[in-house]
Amino acid sequence: MTNIPRSEHPRPQFYRLEFENLNGEWDFEFDFSNSGEQRGMFNPDCHYSKKIIVPFCPESELSGIGYKDFMDAVWYRRVFTLKKEQLKGRVMLHFGAVDYEATTAVNGHVIGTHRGGYSSFEYDITAFVREGENVITLRARDDTRSGAQPSGKQSQSFRSAGCSYTRTTGIWQTVWLEFVPKYYIKRVDITTDYKNGAVYFEAITAGTEQEASVSAEIFYNGESVTKTETALSYGANLLCARIDSPKLWEPGKPELYDVKYTMKASGKICDEITSYFGFRTVSVKNGALNINDKKVFMRTVLDQGFYPDGIYTAPTDDALRHDIELSMSLGFNGARLHEKIFEERFLYWADKLGYIVWGEHANWGFDLSYPENIKYFLSEWTEALERDYNHPSIIGWCPFNETWDNNHRAQDKEMISLVYHQTRAIDKTRPVIDVSGGYHTEDTDFYDIHDYEQRIDVWAERYGRIEPGKIYDPLASRQYSCGQPYWISEYGGTWWAPGRKDGWGYGNAPKSEEELAERYYGLTTTLLKQENICGFCYTQLTDVEQEQNGLYSYDRKPKFSDETYKKIREANTYPAELEKKQDSTEK
């Protein structure tokens, strides 16, 4: 697999040995008139004039296409070969993400349509494949200007501008086949309880068998710790294991346990999967985020997840890890994963490195003023919540960011509230922010604001004397706090692009690196000194195209001197007043 781009297994938290990565060269065709279906392009023998490298979108250079204008529809085709032994069970076809509406055919048979540019989906294609050559055909339709689809920071204009960037169309995450038995494990949800040393598994299985069971064996540092097993029942299968004095997953201290799931039918092993989990309990109390009942000040950075050569797709797995390491090297303990549902490999590295993140949907481009549009949002968001539930690095969910008015039409507050409650219903273990930065409804577990004020004296006046019930809110005329924990989840954004006339950032650019470093230090330490502020999120980790306010360049190169980075690191690691005030019962 060394010649296959992004050849690593895309789901390390649900690893089944029998899989085949389908990344690499596919046939490709533009369909600007969206007439391909009428022209017979689902026919496996239809002519395609171009080649593309999957999983990179056609807008990217790594795809081999590099076309950046709007594309109403695009087509993909891939021939793959199956051996006789691979057909003994079921053949599953997985797509990490396809933007936006993906209709898939196998050997000319349309097997389904998935809507949602950020969530993963799969098909059981057993009935449509045969020994020898087979053909996958996929049409992706994408309209970022429709108002009906979440599209995040993808530009709705021909060119990128401000904080909107190059679009992504079609396949942008790994495509792979998985060979599973007739009876198999579809999903396992993991919930941990560190106080009682308990870990709960909810296994969803496929197929029926009277004498069947599923087990979970837990390992630490390669040694078996405990094992639990249950007979299969209809629907969910619940297992519980207990571990004395469990090792805890914490920011910067990512203790992880491995687990092996085994499904047996008629006494014989039919399915095995390896996974991992961390003992990590999130709560919201005493004005702060708590991890394992300890207050944690969120020292986070805004991460857009864009790459100069791959756009939405990291060029390598190492690039995903490197972004986290860059952030942690500056003293950040986490990130807001901004206006994009990140791929699972990023979350895997966050789990492994002890990096806390807020999971967020790409709601920009989605018109929140029409309640009927909920059908275009909630199904995709639900898929993301279910896919990423088990990652200890995710410490909260944020379905919406900055829901500004659309043509003088305000957001539908009932829609916001519905999504908040649906998120809490799916995941009862994490807090939820209804709308980051505004406009908040009464339904939110944190009250966060965005403020790009650059003057330290004005900043200190706003945030130097925050008290319970007395906060600074730039949108107070449209929203109000109900006493939730308070944090500044976007700030800074300081523009730094000497000599570049087409750059963009917030406020007046500093005249020197020294001024930039002092500005960063003053803004950041003001927040850390307040016990009634529970976190910050600096904009942003890297430059993105014309937005030149990153701490590193778009290609992840240093922008500043070692002295400037030292000052930034000192600010980020300044002792937080909130963490000093831990009650003795919380320590």
Image (cartoon, rainbow, N blue to C red):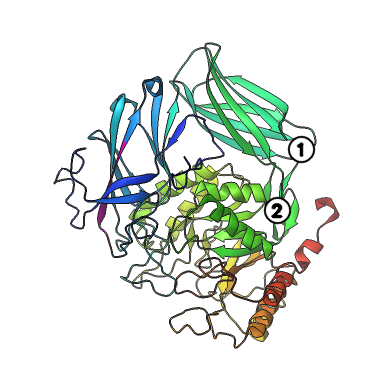
Q: Position of residue 70 (x, y in %)?
A: 28, 63
The image quarter containing residue 226 is: top right
Q: Earlier in the sequence, mark 1 or mark 2?
A: 1
78 in magenta: yes
The image quarter containing residue 569 is: bottom right
The boundaries of the magenta stretch are 70-79
Residue, disc 1:
246
- The residue lying furthest to the front in this view is 3
Q: Position of residue 130 (x, y in %)?
A: 30, 25
Q: Position of residue 207 (x, y in %)?
A: 44, 21
In the drawing, does residue 414 fall left or right of residue 238? left
The image quarter containing residue 202 is: top right
Residue drawn at x 66%, y 35% is 258
Q: Main secondary structure of the magenta part?
A: strand
Q: Mark 2 is on which residue type?
A: Pro
Residue, disc 2:
251
Q: Mark 1 is on which residue type?
A: Pro
Residue drawn at x 59%, y 88% is 511
In the drawing, does residue 156 fall left or right of residue 503? left
* Residue in the foreground of this view, choosing between 195 and 24: 24
Disc 1 is placed on an element classified as: loop
Disc 2 is placed on an element classified as: loop
Q: Is residue 509 visible?
A: yes
501 in magenta: no
Q: Position of residue 297 (x, y in %)?
A: 71, 61
Crowding around mark 1 (Cα neighbors within 10 Å: few <14, some 14 to 19, many 20+) is some
Check if mark 1's residue and mark 2's residue have beta carbons within 8 Å: no
